[in-house]
Image (cartoon, helix red, strand yellow):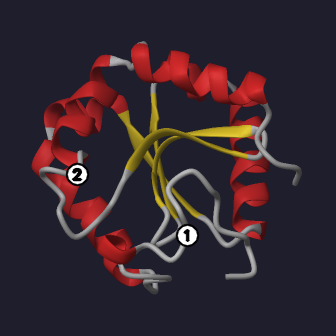
Amino acid sequence: MRGRTPRIQQAAKQLRAEMTSAEQILWTELRPSRMKDLRIRRQHAIGRFILDFYCPARMLAVEVDGGIHDGPDQAERDAARTQALAALGIEVLRIRNEQVEHDLEGTLRLIRGAADCRPERFAASTSAVPANEEPSAAS
């Protein structure tokens, strides 16, 4: 998978500015000031993909899915995307908008549980990879 392009970086920036209400609710709880031991990025680009939320230390992506993900074509694209990310060692956790909006505490427990099950690649406070670089899949 080739690196991030300026077009993908610009799209990620735009998505950060236009987050869905469920993404905004979740980001309020996942932002660094709230999740001190897990550094989570929002609308993070990896290759040709933009992940809703990503924890580099645990190689965990959190995707917040709305109704658009219910269609069969989108389900196939989501599965291919999940498979491509898994090939890089990234686990994808899919959460519905409704779950975030109606059970935020349960959603946070689910994310915390998934993160705790993943090996820590490097200490979040002393990142082995500079913030402007992406860790390689071999790390």
The residue carrying mark 1 is 129
Residue 51 lies, in percent from the top left, at: 56, 42
Identify the residue at horizontal 69%, vertical 53% (top origin): 82
SS class, disc 1: loop
Q: Label 1: how many residues lie within 10 Å, few (<14), some (14-19) or many (20+)? A: few
Q: Is residue 89 above or below residue 103?
A: below
Quarter containing the C terminus: bottom right
SS class, disc 2: loop
- Judge from the rendering whether residue 77 lies leftward or rightward of residue 33; answer left or right: right
Measure how far apart labels 1 and 2 are at the Cα level: 17 Å
Q: Amino acid at mark 1?
A: Val
Residue 62 lies, in percent from the top left, at: 45, 50
The residue carrying mark 2 is 32
- Judge from the rendering whether residue 13 lies leftward or rightward of residue 64; answer left or right: right
- Judge from the rendering whether residue 20 lies leftward or rightward of residue 105; answer left or right: right
Identify the residue at horizontal 72%, vertical 70% (top origin): 136
Q: Label 2: how many residues lie within 10 Å, few (<14), some (14-19) or many (20+)? A: some
